[in-house]
Image (spheres, rainbow, N blue to C red):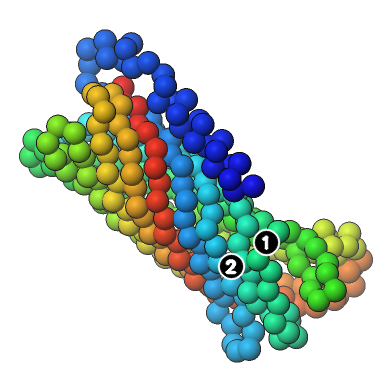
Amino acid sequence: MKIKFACALMGLFFLVLSISPAAAEAQKFPANQNFEISFMYYKFDYKEDLPAPFKSTENGWLPGVYIGWYYNKKNAIYSKVFLEFSYGDTEFDGTTQAGTPIKFTDDNHQLLFRGEWNIGYNFGITKDISIKPYTGYGYRQWDRGYAKVTATYTSYKERYYWHYIPVGIMADFNIGDRLVIEPNVGLRIMFYGKMTAYFSELDPGYNDPEFKLGNKTGWYAEIPLRIKLSQFWSVVVKPWYEYSAIGQSDVEARTYYGALSGYFYEPSSKTNQYGLNVGATFSF
């Protein structure tokens, strides 16, 4: 599955590169708008805060795609919009509610989505250096696992989603005529986080309780390297890291055909992600 997904993304990447830049080269205005498409590959490391011997972790490498647009002109408003989508399997290492160890390494689907908008100002410091403080709005969603019953454990799909405010600063360093280094670091201030547990996928008699998550602030850092092939085309290589966390939720009741069948909560957790994006930028 991962190989097919990667091949499809790389095919799309080369299709973008194959578009003739001749028409673009004929333009007479500065190229301040930029469209980027990249292939993502990153480590996903999630761990819930549970007392021993209980544990719940997700760990593995996930492929994905990044699509973004940004307006970047010195001494002017800076704006950026981007989407990230990734899908794959991770290794689950945990325990049942009775403390029995369980582990499975495949058929453990994860789907992650992010949409973010940034707005700021591009301060031209010198001819080759600019600084861009920004804020904005972001949305994150994670669909974790799916409902299944085996001889040793029962699992169900969980959907996490939250909103956040990005607050960061980016810089542009032009090195010669071909290389631009664009370091970016910032906070992601979470608010209105929810998680839904889909018990009804195990049995339609169950309800699907929704948990209010505790808000936590995460942070991220990236160092994109943009190598110019022409005035309008660039190759982008972007190593990055992100830390995020979720606070413990409130307690919610699970019912079975209206009768109480237990109380549940979502533990606090931490997630570390790091990886590499490789793609192309078209400037116009």
Give the alpha-carbon distance from disc 1 to disc 2, as whole Å.
11 Å
Q: Residue at x 63, y 89 (%)?
A: 53
Vertically, is 137 above or below 160? Answer: above
Where does label 1 land, which residue? Answer: 106
| Secondary structure found at label 1 | loop
Q: Is residue 246 visible?
A: no
Pointer 2 residue: 58
* Amino acid marked by disc 2: Glu
Task: Count residues near mark 2 (Cα–Cα under 10 Å), then give few for <14, some for 14-19, many for 20+.
Answer: many
Q: In percent of the image, x 65 and y 77: which residue is there?
A: 94
Decide if residue 223 is on the left or right side of residue 69.
left
Q: 159 or 271: nearer the eye?
A: 271
- How far from the left and from the top, in percent, is residue 229? 26, 28
Q: Residue furthest bottom?
A: 52
User: What amino acid is found at the position of numbered circle 1 in the picture?
Assistant: Asp
Q: Please tell me which residue lies in front, 13 or 75.
A: 13
User: Across the whole image, how many numbered discs are drawn on residues?
Assistant: 2
Q: Position of residue 225 (x, y in %)?
A: 27, 44
Locate residue 251: give its quadrant. Answer: bottom right
Residues packed near mark 1 inside 10 Å, few (<14), some (14 to 19) or many (20 plus): few
